[in-house]
Image: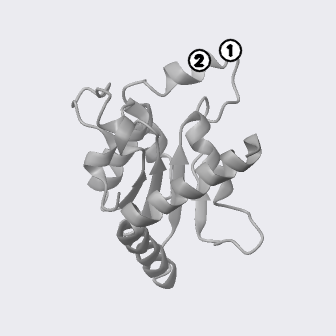
Amino acid sequence: MKIFEKYFLRLEEMLEEVESAESDNIEKAAKMLAEATLGKQSVFAFGCNHAGLITLETFYRTGGLVTVNPVRAPGMMLEISPITSSSKMERLDGYGKIIFGGLPIKKDDVLIIHSVSGRNNVPIDMAIAAKNAGVKVIVITNMNTATYVSSRHPSGKKLHDFADVL
C-alpha cells in the first residue's frame, strides 16, 4: 500500500470516529445555528492562532452563511512576528474579555470557539464573557488533549466547561 493510501485510510477512520462519537453534538450545533439564523441572530466564530483557521473558513464563502461574523483580534491570527508571540498572547489574562467587549454580539447570538487544548486564557475568557451575556457557546476542542493538559486560566477551568454544545 502506498503512503498516500495509508494517509487517506487513516483520514477515513478518523472521520468515522468523529461521526460515531459526535453525531448527536454535531446535530445539536447544527440546530442551534439554524435557529439563530432563522431567528435573525448572529453567529460569531473565534479561535487563536491555528485554531483561528477554522474561523477564517466560516465566513465570506460562496454558499456560506452570511450570519457568520469572524472574531479577529490583534495577535490572535498568526499575523505577528516573532510568531511565538501569538502563543504568549493567547495566555494573556483578560484579553478575551476585551475582545468580546468590542463585538456587536447580543443575547441569544451564537459564538463558536475552537481551541485544541481549551486551556489558554483568551478562549476561556471569551466563553465566560459570552455566557455572562446570554450568548450560546459551541466549543470545538480535542477532548483527548483537553482532559490531559492542565488549565492555564486563573479559574482552573477549561474551555469545554463553558460549552452549551461541545
| Secondary structure found at label 2 | helix
> In this view of the protein, which residue sits in the foreground, 89 or 157?
157
Q: Quick one: label 1, few (<14), some, or many (20+) residues within 10 Å?
A: few
The residue at the point 51 percent across, 78 percent down is: 37
Q: Quadrant of residue 106?
A: bottom left
Residue 135: x %, y % from top left: 35, 61
Residue 12: x %, y % from top left: 59, 58
Q: Which mark, by number, is residue 29?
A: none
Screen quadrant of the C terminus: bottom left
One can see residue 104 in this view? yes
The residue at the point 50 percent across, 80 percent down is: 40
Q: Give left or right: position of 153 versus 117.
A: left
Q: Image height check: is 51 above or below 149?
A: below
In contact (CB < 8 Å): disc 1 and disc 2: yes
Residue 112: x %, y % from top left: 47, 56
* Residue corresponding to mark 1: 82
What amino acid does circle 2 point to?
Ser
> In this view of the protein, which residue sits in the foreground, 139 or 147?
147
Q: Image height check: is 91 above or below 142?
A: above
> In this view of the protein, which residue sits in the foreground, 100 or 66?
66
Q: Which mark, by number, is residue 85?
A: 2
Give the CA separation, mark 1 to mark 2. 6 Å
| Secondary structure found at label 1 | loop
The residue at the point 37 percent across, 26 percent down is: 93
Q: Quick one: label 2, few (<14), some, or many (20+) residues within 10 Å?
A: some
The residue at the point 41 percent across, 65 percent down is: 20
